[in-house]
Image (spheres, rainbow, N blue to C red):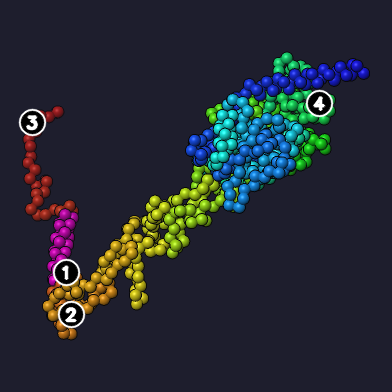
Amino acid sequence: METTTAARRRRRLLLLLVLLALAAHRAAARFVVEKNSLRVTSPAALRGVYECAIGNFGMPQYGGTMHGVVVYPKVDAKACRPFDASGLSFKPKSGGLPVFLLVDRGDCYFTTKGWNAQNAGAAAVLVADDKVEPLITMDSPESSGTEHIENITIPSALVTKRFGDDLRKALQNGEMVNVLLDWRESLPHPDERVEYEFWTNSNDECGAKCDMQMNFVRSFRGIAQALEKRGYTQFTPHYITWYCPEAFILSKQCKSQCINHGRYCAPDPEQDFSIGYDGKDVVVQNLIQICVFRVANETRRPWMWWDYVHDFAVRCPMKEKKYTRECAHGVINSLGLDIEKINKCVGDPDADKENPVLKAEQDAQIGHGSRGDVTILPTLVVNNRQYRGKLEKRSVLKAVCSGFEETTEPDVCLREDIETNECLENNGGCWLDKATNVSACKDTFRGRVCECPTVNGVKFIGDGYSHCEASGLGRCQINNGGCWNETRNGKTVSACSNQEAKGCKCPSGFRGDGMNSCEDVDECKEKLFCQCKDCACENTWGSYECSCGGSNSLYIREHDTCISKQSSSSLGWGFLWVIFIGLALAGAGAYAVYKYRLRSYMDSEIRAIMAQYMPLESQEMPNQHRSVVPVDHADI
């Protein structure tokens, strides 16, 4: 009996040493406190912007702001007990500002303070530090005190001791403290795509945090897959592993928690080496999930990771003794993934060498840039900044949406349950054409922008606040380009021209600014036209009519003159006869020249042929004039 008890004590001691070594590794990590700003608008003595640390529970309003008044409770200042026991309520009266409850640090969990403040009607809880130190992150407890984590929905923040003392003093002096909590710049938003990581664990027996992870995967899966398929986001899952201290590598405990000879370890799920699954089982399942993502990503289907993790949790839970590689392979096959590639990616967990996949995960744990080391599970990282708050669909979606450059966010970020459409009230203070209901107000996740729109391919230009006008081709089809137009007796006249990129100009026959009015010009009264002798002028809308005296005269508008119809007719026929005769003579002359040149050409060709085959009499024959030359020597 004593031997068994001693063995148990040794196992517990060794487990404690291993856990202390892992804790030391975490303590040495670089932890970054994520912050939001708090602006005090009154009293004047405190007016300014202060930093506060975002709590790792509740629901921060990423991308948004909250106005409220600070209240310090008269009793239970540490908020460790429900306020209804003291008869206190912080629900604002009708038309009143939300209450931000200031409480003191100490005596109970941060989550308990947040839960009690929320139940008393507070819209947010501000915890004043009780010691002079840099800001820290208020985390949720690992085991006990976790019953409120899932239900806290108000944002929380930690303020420094000095600022907390100043707030408390102002309130005790009877001053009203108005503040603005601002999360708009808590996450970077550089462009139209958000990159985010989810650091998680396949272990489903770690209590409230494991339940929270699984509920999040189940609820966020559809949104995550839709955003990924449409190219709005780039998602990457990650898994934390630790190495076993060198002094314990050969121990039974390290062998049960680690693979690859102590290089990659996870805590025992039950914190007891003698029962249930071991830490190495968790590491192997984590490795399989990483490889599922990698293989799916190679085939451009990274969203399959969400399906696998969800199905594995449902089909292969620890409590049903199905947390095995065989069960994992069944899920992989049912999703149509390449199991051979996944097994090759997993490698040999018993090999005494590094696993490149898990080595990359350990390297990724180390912080870079503005992101600290990842030491808390679960952790969400959005645009290289760690998310703080409740791991819940709506809250996480707000964080992802706040990572988009304004006006580039997808429609899911503009739903009524995610943000308030500021264009619905007074058109957001932007330009509006009531005639066509064309507005420069564009709703965004962070608020609204006043930006001249593009309608049916026509771009409006202007400042977006007081003026926008259509420009370019087709602009006259939209509210006549904002120009004047009028119809009389079935005739429509407009000051807009598609030949001009912008602006309004009254057409010929009208005078005015082109936008508000164009008035008919009386050409007759102003003696602009029809000033010829014996001409009679009559003004019309946008033009004029001019008639000549007698029925034999014709008015020529281009020359503003009258001519006789008869003289014009005879002159016209005479001119036509002259042209006809001229054309006939030119044709006859051209034909004569052609015949002459053709005959000359034929004669020259015939003479050339006869010269070759029939010598002329004037030419001398070669033998007729040959002379006899005497021989001046001989051979015989």
Question: How far apart in space, not on screen, are marks 2 and 3 (Cα)?
Answer: 121 Å
Disc 4 from disc 3: Cα separation: 146 Å
Q: Is residue 378 left or right of residue 478?
A: right
Q: Which mark is residue 272?
A: 4
**Magenta stretch?**
582-610
Quadrant where the image shows the C terminus: top left
Amino acid residing under circle 2: Ala
Q: Amino acid at mark 4?
A: Asp
Q: Are marks 4 and 2 in contact (CB under 8 Å)?
A: no
Going from the N terminus, do you reach mark 4 or mark 1 first?
Answer: 4
Q: Which residue is identified by label 2?
A: 536
Quick check: is 94 in the magenta stretch? no
Up/down of 486 relative to 272, above or below: below
Q: Which residue is farthest bottom?
A: 551
Q: Which residue is mark 3?
A: 632
Tell me if residue 629 comes above or below residue 553 in the rendering: above
Whichever of labels 4 and 2 marks the residue nearer the N terminus, that label is: 4
Q: Secondary structure at mark 4?
A: loop
Location of mark 1 (residue)? 587
